[in-house]
Image (cartoon, rainbow, N blue to C red):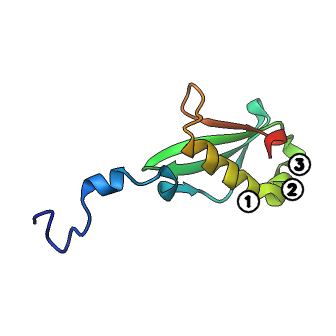
Amino acid sequence: MERGDARYPRSIESFESEPLNQHIQVIDGFDYIEEKSALKIQSIAGGALINCYVMGINCVDSEKVYQALQFDIEEKITELIENEDFNSQGEIEISVSQL
């Protein structure tokens, strides 16, 4: 199969030049990480699994906060991944006050 073949309608280069946000998927649901007092939400960007933490939430309120802010959280995660605003471990950290 050749790149010009109908089975390959786009070149690899055209995928590489697309904005990163077309490749970001925030996975529904969360885990509560007590050591960080944070919601852990995972996302996939460019095939990589990225851990994202929403800091400053206590366990008792975690479900309520997630339900109330889910879409704001997802938008913020997407924005930070697009801007490549990762910590030194390659993770995204958001303070609940940023939402």
Looking at the picture, which amino acid does disc 2 mark? Lys
| Secondary structure at numbered mark 3 | helix
**Rendering quarter of residue 37:** top right
Residue to which mark 1 is pinned: 71
**Mark 3 residue crowding within 10 angstroms, few (<14) / some (14–19) / many (20+):** few
Q: Amino acid at mark 1?
A: Phe
Contact between labelled residues 2 and 1, with CB atoms less than 8 Å apart:
no
**Eye-nearest disc, 1 or 2:** 1
Q: Is residue 99 left or right of residue 92?
A: right
**Residue 93, image quadrant:** top right
* Residue annotated with mark 2: 64
Q: Secondary structure at mark 2?
A: helix
Which residue is found at the position 58% from the left and 33% from the top?
Answer: 86
The residue carrying pointer 2 sits among few (fewer than 14), some (14 to 19) or many (20 or more) residues within 10 Å by Cα, namely few
Left-right relation of 45 to 27 = left
Residue ID for mark 3: 61
> Element at badge 1?
helix
Residue sitting at 21 percent across and 67 percent down?
Answer: 8
Lower sequence index among marks 1 and 3: 3
Q: Position of residue 39 (x, y in %)?
A: 74, 44
Whether residues under marks 2 and 3 lie with C-beta atoms below 8 angstroms apart, the answer is yes
- List x then y, in percent, for residue 6: 18, 74
Pick out the residue farthest to the top: 88
Labels 1, 3: front one: 1
Name which quarter of the figure residue 70 lies in: bottom right
Placement of 86 over or under 81, stated as above or below: above
Q: Residue at x 20, y 72 (%)?
A: 7
Label drawn at residue 44: none
